[in-house]
Image: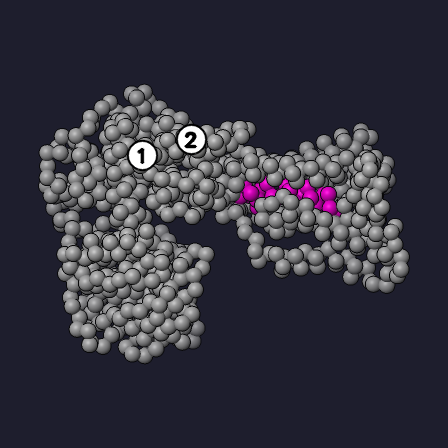
Amino acid sequence: MSDLFSELFLGALLFGAMTAAVPLLLAGLGEQISEKAGVLNIGIEGMMIFGAYTGFVGAYYSGSLWFGFLTGALGGAVVASIMVLLCVRIGLNQIVIGIGLTLGFDGLTALLHHFQFSRTYPRLAAAEITAIPLLSDIPVIGPAFFRHHLLVYLAVLLVGVMVYVYRRTQLGLNLQAAGDKPAALDVAGVDVVRTRTVAVLSTGVLAGLGGAYLADVGAGIFVPFITNGAGFLGIVLAMLARGRPLWVLLGALVFGLCLSLTTALQVAGINIPTDVIQMIPFLAVMAMLVIFGRRSQLPAALGIPYVRGAR
Amino acid sequence: MKHVDNSIEAGGHPVIALERVTKRFPGVVANDSVSLAIRAGEVHVLLGENGAGKSTLIGMLSGLQQPDEGRILIDGQPVAITSPRHALSLGVGTVFQHAMLVPTLTVAENLLLGAAWWRRPRKDSLRAEVEELASSLGIRIDLDATAAELSLGEQQQVEILRALLRNSRVLILDESTSMLTPSGIDELGALMRRLVKRGLAIVFITHKLREATAFGDRISILKLGRKVGEIAPERFSALSEDDLTAEIVETMFGNRRSDPDATTRVGTQFPADAQPLLAVRDLCLAPSATSPGLSKISFELRAGEVLGIAGIDGNGQKQLAEVLAGQIAADSGAILLEGRPVDAMSVGARRDAGLRYLTDDRLGEGTVGAFPVSINFFLKQVGRSPFWKAGIEQGGEIDRRAAELVRDYDVRTPSIRTPIGRLSGGNIQKVLLARELSTGAKAVIFNKPTYGLDLANTLVTRQRILDAAASGKGTLVISTDLEELLQLCDRIAVMSGGRLVGTVANGPHAASEVGSLMIGLAA
């Protein structure tokens, strides 16, 4: 048991927490954009799994992680564009289409994987680490948070970018108006459908990127259903954060820690059944929903397709 | 309200003209070959009842809908207005009936909506522009307030300002007075006069005669999608207000009746020692984020009396109604019906005891839109004999009784099996009236009974209220329409900030007394 609190263990635990938090962070920030604009994007899990698959394929055949991130983001955007067509343009039910996309792309990626990789299970080389000078030398904290792939820092930076977009830009105003009162945005002369299209595509890009990171850096391999609900956790994060990017980051770290704890506790060989340990992240979700969920405020027009002139 | 000077250069060139415009929706012709000319420097009133086609006309001018036939000319050139954005760029600004501000954004942010998305919001130059414009119009606007904090009148001012900031030449005001207080309406009227003096063209949509004659230069009258009359400025100024009213009423209704808003009822005095039918003592309810709560509300209502509750919307009227109906529990106080306390009774038990509530939320809480008219009559008796026996619906009994009520209350419905959501507001209100008044009612609370109804249905509803009182029921009428209360009530109590600030016996001076109570304490 004493191993549990050793410096090494703690460092590994926190490193794992950060690694696990990044896909959640990207998914949560992405979902937040859609929800701000009034689209409940349940298809985000599908965007993530397809991003993970296309990201892995891109990185595997090109040998470049960055090319993998690009193809992953594109993969997410492809799924998002289906969502745009069906839910934003045609105005079909966002929940039904979202579930459909998630199940469909879970299945499609498993199938493609079966034909391509099921005999070989190829792995990618370990991701290149960018250590931040000075900070990375701090004991425990340094290796845990400042020895990661460059994308990790970019993802954290994105939190600040999103805060700026929401608070200070015209785009931020438009997104919020599209979610809270789309008719007002329309009569102010801004196309609601176009605004929501941009929002959902951005969600797809971020979710795809998150999926690609998960497969290429986090795991180094693609296996079917690898996202394992990370997109859904992103939805939970976006709901709890009430439109604030910083809260998404905090939530992602908490969930990341829980996920990391699952692995760490199994590795440490603690005498608790694995099944119980694996429940930890989802118990954390429920606990956070109970504590913070009551106060969550959602945009007034969330989930409602916009039809001009309808009452 | 006095007829305002309209001698300024009315009758310039038309900024916008509609030529024989027709718009059809499935099953209805909303506009049938309507022609209109909107001129600079003129308030052009579109007058008509619900369903006359006013909203559709506005929809086409503001780019929400396109005409099926006919054309729209701007400065003499035919134009297809394809979107609200296009309408704005053509100089047509619209203030819609329901506020079109984003409630969670500040006034400044709302005014900034619509700029190109890559631009940085230019808050500083906006502030200067708004201050100049607002002071020249004599209005005050707090740019940093959240839109949801503003009163409906202030929200409208923001929307008018927005249209002006975008250099609109035509300003369309769609039923802008329907949610305003009497003083708010006068303020809007004065603002409209100032705007047309600057050369703006205003289209003012209303179904209130008095506003049309007080604020308009030219009146076009719509009826069932057709334009049935137009009164030009020359004729407008030549006629006295009474003659004008008579002419409009004749055009709108044939010579059926005079202006229904014009009468004031002189209240009946009830002896103070008469046994009150409904007595309310010191009702209190804690304030919430959206309402001021109730503080020490006390009043008595006698059999046969009509007691009005006046006040600006959102001063606790709805909470009072729901506490009386039992839908929310008061923190303290007592409600006595015929001397017996009902505080401990549920909604259903109060109804059975004769305390009835007609909600203002007809579609949300009053009816189930997808259910047939017949079931909606008996929504509050579901499971009860004779309409249900041992849990089984007695279709025959329901249909028989529903058919009677449809006849007695003149509900215009294709059949009793039609889902009630398809009926007009006036007919839904008739169903609610039938449900609450037909059997066993003793004291009835009407919450905004004619809100959103057209003139014909407003008159029917008001008559029902008077009939109910005449048959010995105690009636409490909550309304923001002062004219309505003056016409119906024996006494009018004024509510402000969750308190009853005074009660006035109806009579020739009641209007000014109630008005001063509303304004004096609302400030």
The residue carrying pointer 1 sits among few (fewer than 14), some (14 to 19) or many (20 or more) residues within 10 Å by Cα, namely some
Task: List x then y, in percent, for residue B70.
Answer: 30, 28
Q: Residue at coordinates 75% horizontally, 39% vertically from top-left?
A: A152
Quarter of the image with the N terminus of chain B is: top left
Distance from Cα at disc 2 to Cα at disc 1: 14 Å
- Foreground pick, B373 / B288: B288
User: Where on the picture, by quarter, is residue B480?
Assistant: bottom left
Q: What is the number of the mark on residue B137?
A: 1
Marked residue chain, label 2 = B
The amino acid on which the numbered mark 1 sits, given as a three-letter code, is Leu
The boundaries of the magenta stretch are A20-41
- Looking at the rendered structure, the secondary structure element under dot 2 is helix
The amino acid on which the numbered mark 2 sits, given as a three-letter code, is Ala
Q: Residue at coordinates 31% horizontally, 34% vertically from top-left?
A: B137
Magenta stretch mostly in which secondary structure?
helix
Q: Please give the residue where the numbered disc 2 appears in the rendered image.
A: B128
Q: What is the number of the mark on residue A305?
A: none
Q: Residue at coordinates 22% horizontally, 24% vertically from top-left?
A: B12
Marked residue chain, label 1 = B
